[in-house]
Every structure is written in structure tokens, then in C-alpha cells.
Image (cartoon, helix red, strand yellow):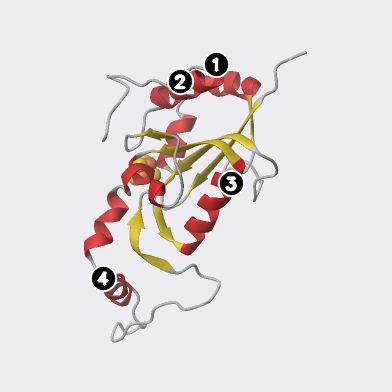
Amino acid sequence: MLPRKLRIATTSLSGCFGCHMSFLDIDERLIELAGLVEFDRSPITDIKHCSQRCDVALIEGGVCNAENVHVLRELRANAKTLVALGACAVNGGLPAQRNHLDVGRCLSQVYRTPDGTAAAIPNDPELPLLLDKVYPINEIVRVDYFLPGCPPSGDTIWKFLTDLLTGRTPRIEHPLLKFD
Ligand code: SF4
């Protein structure tokens, strides 16, 4: 009997999708990967919520709004191993530069009436409220692995995944380990 395929979920919270693009940079190895894993909830599938327990959840982006918190908690509850993928998930990344600013003032400066004379901050209840700061994901849930880089390279992601898939403890060393 063939071994069970590992089940992977991915998401982008307060990310730029660059880490997902880097994931796709494993290029033709995606075909090999497709033989080893199945994707659950992910921007690259049409699955909106985890359909079953997953082996691995790859989390791109920090946590900047209420919806990010819900998504992250769903993935943590459904994943055996949860990975902070990229600088934003690891430490908030560039979006966390807003942390020394007042979020209310930021919004009122960005959203203006058409003539630009007054603040017109969107207040539809459908919209998730921003948090006071951008948080790394480990301040919301437990994280099993941190994979730094903005983004981590395709080769780094491949080394990490193949370590996991073959039952080794993932080990990333220079020159695959970087922080920019
Ligand atoms: S770590 Fe870099 S590439 Fe990844 S989501 Fe953040 S800004 Fe984008």
C-alpha cells in the first residue's frame, strides 16, 4: 500500500503573497511535491476552511486584523505542525513598521472624503477591524517552526518541506538561511 500523502494547508494573513510566490519557485519540483502531499485550505485551492486535520500549516504574514486572528486560530486547531513562513509571520515584518504610529491617526489620514477635507474611515461591519499593532504569529498561537527570509527562497522552502516529509527534523543552514 502507498504511504498516506501528507496534508498541507497554507494561508496569507498580513502578507504580500511573496512567500507563496517563493513556494511556487520550487518550479518543476511542484510535480514531485504533488505526488507526496495533498493541499487543504490554501490560496491555491478552493477550500475555504480546513476540511480535516492537516499535517502541516504554512503561515505567511503577521497578524494585523481580527480576521487574521480567526484564520490563524483555525489553522492552529487543525494542524499538527504549524510553520511561520517568512519575516512577516516570524516578527511582523515590514508591515510592523506601523507599530510606532497610532492606528486611528493612520486611518484618518489615508481615508478621506472625495474632496479630501475630512476623514471618512470605512465602517461596514463586514470589514475586519485593525488591531492596534501588527503581531508576529507566535504572539497569538504556538509555532513549531520559524522559517525566516523576505521571502525564504524556493530552495529553502523545498529543503524545509523535504526534511519534514521524510521525517527528519528540518535543518536550514547557510546559505539557505537568510533574513532579508
Ligand atoms: S515575508 Fe516578505 S515576501 Fe513574505 S509576506 Fe512578508 S513581505 Fe511578503
Q: Look at the numbered disc 4 and say if its residue's Cβ is closer than 8 Å to ligand 1.
A: no
Q: Which residue is mark 1?
A: 166
Residue type highlighted by circle 2:
Thr
Element type where label 3 sits in the image: helix
Label ID, residue 169: 2
Q: Residue 121 location, x and y as percent?
A: 39, 78
Element type where label 1 sits in the image: loop
The mark nearer the N terminus, 4 or 1, is 4
Q: Which residue is mark 4?
A: 102
- Characterize the local packing of mark 1: few (<14), some (14-19) or many (20 or more) Cα atoms within 10 angstroms: few
Q: Residue 61 location, x and y as percent?
A: 41, 47
- Characterize the local packing of mark 3: few (<14), some (14-19) or many (20 or more) Cα atoms within 10 angstroms: some
Task: In the rendered view, tell whether residue 48 sits above or below residue 159.
Answer: below
Residue type highlighted by circle 1:
Thr
The residue lying at 46 percent from left, 48 percent from top is 141
The mark nearer the N terminus, 3 or 1, is 3
Residue type highlighted by circle 3:
Ala
Q: Look at the numbered disc 1 and say if its residue's Cβ is closer than 8 Å to ligand 1.
A: no
The quadrant of the rendering that contains the C terminus is top left
Q: Which of the two discs, 4 and 3, sits closer to the camera?
A: 3
The residue lying at 30 percent from left, 70 percent from top is 103
Q: Residue 35 location, x and y as percent?
A: 65, 20
Residue type highlighted by circle 4:
Asp
The residue lying at 36 percent from left, 32 percent from top is 152
* Measured Cα–Cα span from mark 2 to mark 3: 22 Å
